Image (spheres, helix red, strand yellow):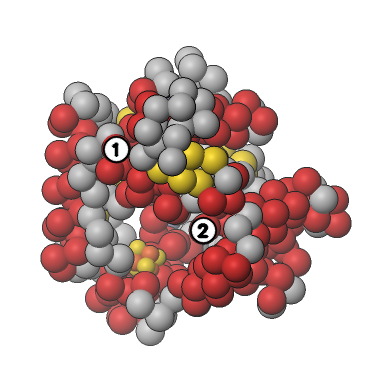
């Protein structure tokens, strides 16, 4: 098979586009898709400070590498969830990546701060680990972006992730989630930072191929808590459809963005905000979701803001 661009021998075939690329032109294709996403949704500019949420997996490291290669000003944030060997390994991989490219990586370790990991906090709260994890990660990401003055938080969600989320939202008619689903989430009423997903046009297969071609070492293991995740089942179903009919995921998700979104328009709501009684961050209740999780788990509600401000000079 020959590269569609230069007719040299191809290294990869993209079934959904019926296109083959050599290494050089595949990388060029990936950069083009990411630039297209950034421009289409006006995600950020070259002068903006971007915080990349890094997990040590292929998507977030590919994203950081792409943004860096394209000349964007990006630092990484790794949140160590204290999930035994998985967290140790993924932190190591993220740190190695940052060092090899001379990039700044902020590390916030839940276990170092609270003495326990996400699993234990969730257990003490009698909550599923992923819901506790979601609240804690969101809080730390927002606080880091706010206190260290990042314009935007970029996450490694790809086409497979977004189409699986969309399938779940439609199957359960989660209207509010359908209104909110987008490659860009603007600053919300609670003053939370803007979040963007520059990889939404790229499949999981393509981010893996990108990492292999750019020799990016990443953690292969999934988080052990994700084993039963519904999203993995949705991904499996979409993979079956994609196998029979290449392009299904793209048609499904891009079609939603272009046509479906017209039926799910977010309304502007007036929300009354308070200062959390413990951490003073904005919240719609008296105590924010993060502080509720920490205090319910009988942990000391330490001042996370002070901890994050210390990252500035580290
Ligand atoms: Fe957190 Fe659940 Fe994702 Fe693991 S699978 S990182 S616990 S949200
Ligand atoms: Zn080529
Ligand atoms: Zn709080």
Chain-order first, disc 2 or disc 1: 2
Q: In front: 172, or 299?
A: 172
Give the mark count. Answer: 2
Q: Secondary structure at mark 2?
A: helix
Q: Quadrant of residue 62?
A: top left
Q: Quadrant of the N terminus?
A: top left
Q: In front: 120, or 36?
A: 36
Q: Which residue is mark 1?
A: 213
Mark 2 crowdedness (10 Å alpha carbons): few <14, some 14-19, many ≥20: many
Say whether residue 81 is left or right of residue 149.
Answer: left
- In this picture, is 193 found above or below 182? above
Please state the horizontal and vertical placement of residue 29, each as a whole percent of the image: 49, 31
Q: Is residue 191 visible?
A: no
Say whether residue 132 is left or right of residue 216.
Answer: right
Disc 2 to disc 1, C-alpha distance: 22 Å
Residue drawn where x is 69% and y is 77% of the image: 172
Q: In front: 197, or 310?
A: 197
Instruction: Check residue 161 in the rendering and tell me which mark sits there, or answer none.
Output: 2
- Classify mark 1 as within 8 Å of ligand 2 or not, answering yes or no: no
Q: Secondary structure at mark 1?
A: helix
């Amino acid at each position: 098979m020959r590269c569609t661009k230069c007719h040299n021998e191809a290294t990869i075939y993209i079934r959904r586009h019926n296109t083959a690329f050599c290494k050089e032109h595949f990388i060029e294709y990936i950069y083009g898709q990411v630039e297209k996403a950034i421009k289409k949704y006006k995600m950020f500019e070259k002068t903006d400070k971007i915080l990349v949420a890094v997990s040590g997996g292929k998507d977030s490291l590919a994203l950081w590498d792409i943004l860096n290669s394209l000349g964007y000003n990006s630092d990484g944030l790794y949140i160590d969830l204290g999930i035994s060997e998985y967290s140790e390994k993924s932190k190591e991989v993220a740190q190695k990546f940052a060092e090899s490219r001379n990039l700044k990586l902020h590390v916030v370790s839940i276990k170092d701060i609270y003495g326990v990991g996400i699993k234990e906090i969730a257990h003490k709260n009698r909550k599923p680990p992923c819901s506790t994890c979601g609240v804690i990660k969101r809080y730390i990401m927002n606080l880091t972006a706010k206190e260290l003055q990042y314009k935007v938080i970029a996450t490694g969600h790809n086409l497979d992730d977004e189409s699986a989320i969309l399938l779940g939202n439609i199957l359960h008619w989660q209207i509010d989630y359908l209104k909110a689903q987008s490659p860009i989430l603007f600053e919300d009423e609670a003053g939370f930072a803007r979040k963007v997903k520059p990889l939404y046009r790229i499949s999981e297969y393509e981010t893996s191929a990108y990492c292999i071609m750019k020799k990016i070492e990443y953690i292969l293991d999934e988080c052990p808590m994700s084993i039963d995740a519904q999203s993995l089942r949705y991904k499996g179903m979409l993979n079956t459809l994609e196998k029979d009919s290449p392009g299904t995921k793209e048609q499904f998700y891009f079609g939603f963005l272009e046509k479906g979104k017209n039926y799910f328009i977010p309304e502007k709501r007036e929300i009354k905000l308070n200062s959390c009684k413990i951490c003073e961050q904005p919240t719609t209740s008296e105590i924010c979701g993060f502080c509720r999780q920490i205090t319910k788990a009988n942990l000391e509600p330490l001042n996370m803001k002070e901890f994050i401000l210390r990252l500035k000079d580290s």
